[in-house]
Amino acid sequence: LELAGRLTHEARYGAPGLALLQVAPRRGACSHPLVAGARCLQVREVRYDKQGLAVGPPGEWQLMYEDIEGFKHTEGERNVVRVKRFTRNPVPADASATLYVLDLVVESQVVAR
């Protein structure tokens, strides 16, 4: 038996910020220099008050070129997720400066086509 330690994201990048993201039920076409016909997550920020009620309109839909670590997207399912948002330093050449890690699935809903 051999045990090996691994740094947590907090140890590597420092304290994260938290964000609530709504993930669209379908991936969107995106241009990726290494993947022909790439399909990316479509996300937008949402806000809730202390009672769990939506506050204000959601943000604009944006393509996310990397997946959310720990989150498995299912086509046809809309999700609201709480993510930890880390700033990578140094930034890998083939990755975004921001790393998103799933903290909690807040809501899931199957959406008809």
Image (cartoon, grey):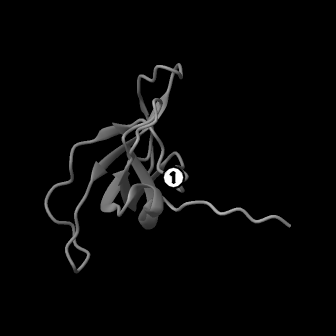
What residue did someone put label 1 on? 69
> Is residue 92 shown to the viewer in this render?
yes
Looking at the image, residue 1 sits to the left or right of residue 57; the answer is right
At 32% from the left and 63% from the top, the residue drawn is 18
The secondary element bearing badge 1 is classed as: loop
- Location of residue 5 in the rendering, given as x and y in whole percent from the top left corner: 65, 63
- Location of residue 45 in the rendering, given as x and y in whole percent from the top left corner: 26, 53
Q: Quadrant of residue 1?
A: bottom right
Q: Is residue 111 above or below residue 62?
A: below
Hey, what amino acid is under mark 1? Glu
Q: Is residue 23 above or below residue 106?
A: above
Looking at the image, residue 77 sits to the left or right of residue 21; the answer is right
At 61% from the left and 60% from the top, the residue drawn is 6
Q: Nearer the viewer, residue 38 or 54?
A: 38
Q: Is residue 3 above or below residue 40?
A: below
- Location of residue 78 in the rendering, given as x and y in whole percent from the top left corner: 42, 54
At 81% from the left and 64% from the top, the residue drawn is 2
> Is residue 110 shown to the viewer in this render?
no
